[in-house]
């Protein structure tokens, strides 16, 4: 059993990752923490609460997190995910509220109260986690593992030619997290870009009359009807669901030790993740980086699990 905190910025693929977490008996979802990323933290928090209301899992606490990156201005991806973050989905009014704790406080409390038990699944910018490290450095020794969706090591970025969105949105936070000396697996664009869900697959998967299938159809509608034609991206890449799946099925991915740094100063390369795969060229590896993925196996697992749990 993997006890996880899902640190997230819902987000269409974040919502799909949440559905997968709730469909996987290997996962015990301890809490959701939110952050500004795809949209402002006000929207990401509302979306998390509404998605839990939709799925009937209002027992899971949600803690609102950081509104601003450590340095610089907020970056949004509303052109991809829609103005409110979930495409055209009409989410229910949440019947729960965020806990009083800030996300940073909840992360620290959960990890320090359960040493060696908590896995942090980071599928948004890393602001909350960097702040938690600053406040309580001992979490680096007390966490079970940190699994990050972020970075582009041997492939171009998706927000600039050099940088992937989650890292670019708060590169200084990513720098802090990668330097903390804890066990990290990075699920990068090198593999998530190889897990496309085609429009035909998405529409077939989203068939059904349930409220959740309706929500999924409405989320996909924005992506395939608005974003994809404008930006030439015909398939939906399953970035965050792959990261979540790698927690309980790590053999979906081929991993390679690497030493990864984040570029903080470059005018054209800010947020770039620079990876050294040969130890003699840099310090001891600080991550296990995703290199290859069994894409078809992952997609089928996702469709079967979520489709069975939420018919």
Image (cartoon, grey):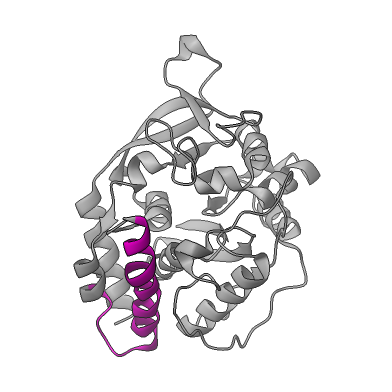
In this view, 36 is above or below 184: below
Residue at far right of view: 135
Between 190 and 222, the one lying in front of the other is 222
Q: Nearer the viewer, residue 236 or 178?
A: 236
Asked whether 203 falls inside the magenta stretch, the response is: no
Residue 216 part of the magenta segment: yes
Identify the residue at horizontal 46%, vertical 25% (top origin): 258
Q: Residue at left 21%, top 53%?
A: 297
Please count the marks in the image: 0
Quadrant position of residue 214: bottom left
Residue found farthest to the top? 280
Residue 28 visible within the image: no
- Point 68% across, 55% down: residue: 107
Task: Look at the picture and state if 122 lies above or below 24.
Answer: above
Residue 307 position, x and y percent, is: 28, 75
Between 304 and 203, which is closer to the camera in this rendering? 203
Quarter containing the N terminus: bottom left
Q: Is residue 269 left or right of residue 237?
A: right
x and y, in percent, of residue 66 in the image: 71, 58
Residue 224 image point, x, y percent: 32, 68
Question: Which picture quadrant has residue 87?
Answer: bottom left
**Is 37 on the left or on the right of 26, as rendered?**
right
Regarding residue 51, the answer to whether it shows in the image is yes
The percent position of residue 130, horizontal first and vertical second, equals 69, 44
111 lies above or below 50 = above
- The quadrant in which the C terminus is found is bottom left
Magenta segment's dominant SS is helix
**What is the residue that sits farthest to the front in this orientation?**
230
Stretch of the chain drawn in magenta: 205-231
């Amino acid at each position: 059993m993997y006890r996880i905190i899902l640190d997230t910025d819902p987000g269409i693929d974040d919502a799909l990752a949440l559905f997968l977490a709730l469909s996987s008996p290997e996962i015990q979802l301890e809490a959701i923490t939110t952050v500004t990323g795809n949209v402002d933290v006000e929207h990401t928090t509302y979306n998390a609460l509404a998605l839990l209301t939709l799925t009937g899992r209002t027992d899971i606490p949600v803690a609102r997190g950081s509104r601003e990156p450590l340095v610089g201005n907020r970056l949004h991806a509303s052109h991809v995910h829609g103005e409110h973050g979930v495409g055209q989905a009409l989410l229910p009014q949440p019947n729960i509220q965020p806990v009083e704790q800030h996300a940073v406080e909840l992360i620290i409390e959960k990890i320090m109260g359960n040493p060696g038990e908590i896995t942090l699944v980071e599928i948004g910018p890393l602001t909350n986690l960097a702040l938690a490290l600053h406040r309580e450095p001992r979490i680096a020794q007390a966490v079970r593992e940190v699994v990050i969706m972020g970075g582009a090591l041997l492939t171009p970025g998706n927000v600039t030619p050099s940088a992937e969105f989650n890292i670019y949105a708060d590169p200084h936070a990513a720098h802090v997290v990668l330097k903390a000396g804890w066990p990290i697996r990075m699920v990068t664009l090198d593999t998530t870009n190889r897990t496309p869900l085609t429009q035909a697959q998405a529409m077939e998967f989203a068939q059904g009359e349930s409220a959740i299938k309706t929500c999924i159809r409405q989320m996909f509608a924005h992506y395939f009807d608005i974003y994809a034609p404008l930006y030439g991206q015909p398939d939906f890449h399953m970035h965050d669901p792959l990261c979540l799946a790698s927690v309980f099925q790590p053999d979906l991915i081929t991993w390679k030790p690497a030493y990864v740094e984040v570029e903080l100063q470059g005018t054209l390369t800010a947020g770039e993740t620079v990876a050294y795969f040969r130890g003699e060229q840099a310090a001891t590896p600080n991550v296990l980086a995703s290199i290859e993925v069994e894409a078809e196996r992952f997609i089928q697992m996702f469709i079967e699990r979520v489709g069975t749990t939420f018919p």
